[in-house]
Image (cartoon, grey):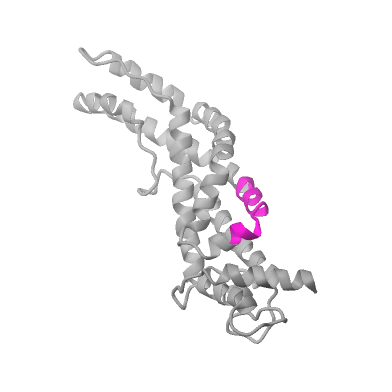
Amino acid sequence: MKTVRVTLLCLALLVTTMPAAASNSWLQKGTDTLKSLGMGEKKTTAPTAPGTGTALPMADIIAGLKEALTVGSGNVVQQLGQAGGFYKDPQIRIPLPDTLATVKNALDKVGMGSFADDLELKLNRAAEAATPKARDLFVNAISQMTFEDARVILNGSEDAATRYFREKMSPDLAEAMAPVVDDSLSQVGAVRSYDKMMGQYATLPFVPDVKADLTDHVVQKGMDGIFHYMAKEEAAIRADPVKRTTDLLKKVFQ
């Protein structure tokens, strides 16, 4: 009983700091459930799922959040890890590295801009090939999420979970994507396209010498694209019932 009282007291202190949010947000509903543990008169029963008379343990709330993030991250990886996932999307399409802008401009002026366009396509293909590596890293980051992590995310901004993933995943994601991108750059012909482009550029008079790290560029831009859509997916799950695709999500966030 002493442990129970201490736990309830901690939860009471924790949830009193939570601000109000939009009534149709699953964030607010999760917060309301947290409040039922310690706000107002003392309660000894399990919290109730918002909009129902069903007791909902705190473990279900956390499990619901983790499941929502697992579903959302899986959607993002599937969307971006297919042909055209990056290249056909103007919001995340990977451009040539800034250092190659001079090369592209010079080639455009002499009617050889197609070499730069072909390289840009190949860079995006490499990112699409490497994106599936993010799936296991999302799952691992979610599995390591603590109660405090979950509380901060539930009580945070629309992209609170995405910020959590960026902090936890970025080094490992970059490390996992780099060899795949490096290999893909060769397989999809990006290295050959780069050599052809630079060969044509070298024939032009009075042009500066330029270089670019294609692998690092694709990895960084690829990660930006993944987290860009993770933030959108997170916001949609918070606000849109249609995005709650499993029984647990519907029970926790209805």
Q: Nearer the viewer, residue 7 or 82?
A: 7
Looking at the image, residue 219 lies above or below residue 31:
above
Residue at image coords 49%, 45%: 83
Q: Is residue 153 visible?
A: yes
Please say whether residue 81 is visible from this viewpoint. Answer: no
Q: Is residue 211 above or below residue 164?
A: above
State the residue at coordinates (29%, 18%). Answer: 201
Picture quarter with the C terminus: bottom right
Horizontal side of residue 160 vs 68, given as left or right: left
- Magenta stretch: dominant secondary structure: helix
Residue 149 lies in the magenta stretch: yes
Label tally: 0
Compared to 211, does 216 lie above or below? below
Q: From which residue to which does the magenta span run?
A: 136-150
Q: Position of residue 51 (x, y in %)?
A: 58, 84
Q: Which residue is depicted at the point 47% across and 77% down?
A: 24
Could you say where residue 171 lies in the image, as x and y percent from the top left? 55, 37
- Please provide percent x and percent y for residue 29: 54, 75
Name the residue: 45% across, 73% down.
Answer: 21
Residue at the outermost right position: 1
Image-quadrant location for residue 121: top left
- Answer whether residue 130 is magenta in the image: no
Who is closer to the viewer here, 6 or 57? 6
Q: Is 215 placed left or right of 95 in the picture?
A: right
Task: Pinpoint residue 94: horizontal percent, then vertical percent.
Answer: 39, 39
